[in-house]
Amino acid sequence: MSTSTLSRPDRRTSTLVVVSHGHGQQREDPDFDVPEWAARWARSLGWELHRYTNGGPGAAAAAAGPGARALLLRPGSPASARRERQRPHVVAAVAAMPDDGAVVADAVECADAVGAALTFVHAVPCSFGERSVDLAGALARGQHLLDTAACAAEALSAGLSPTTQLLRVRPHELVGEALDADLLVIGGPRTVRRRPDHRGSVQPGGLGLVAHSALHHAPCPVLVTPR
C-alpha cells in the first residue's frame, strides 16, 4: 500500500475537547488546566479548544465525533508512576488502514509534541485457536497492518522510529490495566458508513467497543480521534 494514501487528514475545521475524569455534573470551565502540549497542539492547527470538568468517560464519548477529538484526562499518571523511565510512551491502537490514517497522524503529532516513544498495537482475537486454519493468515494480516501504520508514521515524522506489537487478545482487552502507555490514541466514530460485512460492536454515541472500553478502563489519558 502506498504511503501517499496515508497523508495527514484535513484538519482545518476541528475541535479538541479536553475532559477531566471525575464524577458529578459536567460543566464547561474556561480556566480548566489543559496539558501544555495539548493546548499548543490545538493552537498550532487552529482548533477550537473546549474544557469540561467532572465529565468523565461519558462526556468524552459524547464529545468524540466528526471534526472533534476528545482527550480524557486521568487523575495523576498511574501508568508513569508504575515505571521508572525518562521518556513518555504513546500507544496507538489501529484496526484497519487507511481507515485509521487519522489515528496514525494524531499519534505521531502527540509523540512529537512530548518527545515520546510511539508504539502501534493490534489485536488478533483469541477466537482464532492455535490450530485454527486461518490463524497464520490473521497474524500475517495483523502484522502487515502494523507495518503499514509504522511506515506511514515514519513518512509523517522523519525522526520517529515507531515499534509495533501484535497481541493475542480480544480487541477491547488492549486497553486494560496492563496497558503500558502514558497516552492512548484510538479511533472514534467513523465518518463514513461501515461496510455491510463489518461486524464490529457499536456502543451508544457511535463508538466502537474498543474505544468505549478505552474511555472507561484505560489507566492513562485517552485521545479519541475521528475517522
Image: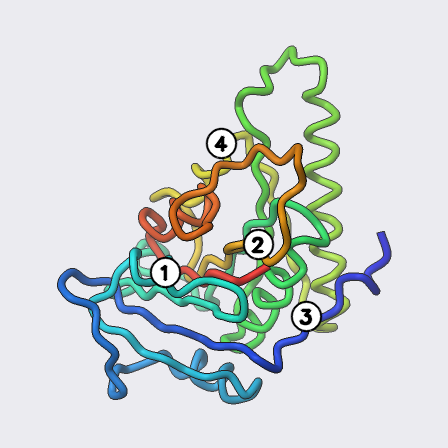
Residue placed under numbered mark 1 in the picture: 62
The mark closer to the camera, 1 or 4, is 1
Q: CA distance from mark 2 to mark 3?
A: 14 Å
**Which of the 4 quarters of the picture holds residue 119?**
bottom right
Closer to the chain start, of discs 4 and 2, is 4
Mark 4 is surrounded, within 10 Å at the Cα level, by few (under 14), some (14 to 19) or many (20 or more) other residues, namely: some
Residue placed under numbered mark 4 in the picture: 170
Residue placed under numbered mark 2 in the picture: 190
Q: CA distance from mark 1 to mark 4?
A: 24 Å
Mark 3 is surrounded, within 10 Å at the Cα level, by few (under 14), some (14 to 19) or many (20 or more) other residues, namely: few
Mark 1 is surrounded, within 10 Å at the Cα level, by few (under 14), some (14 to 19) or many (20 or more) other residues, namely: some
Closer to the chain start, of discs 1 and 4, is 1
Going by the numbered disc 3, the residue's amino acid type is Pro
Residue 84 vertical placement versus 202 (above, below): below
- Image location of residue 85, percent across then percent down: 42, 62
87 left or right of 139 in image: left
Determine contact: label 1, label 3, CB under 8 Å.
Answer: no
Q: CA distance from mark 3 to mark 4?
A: 29 Å
- Image location of residue 76, percent across then percent down: 25, 65
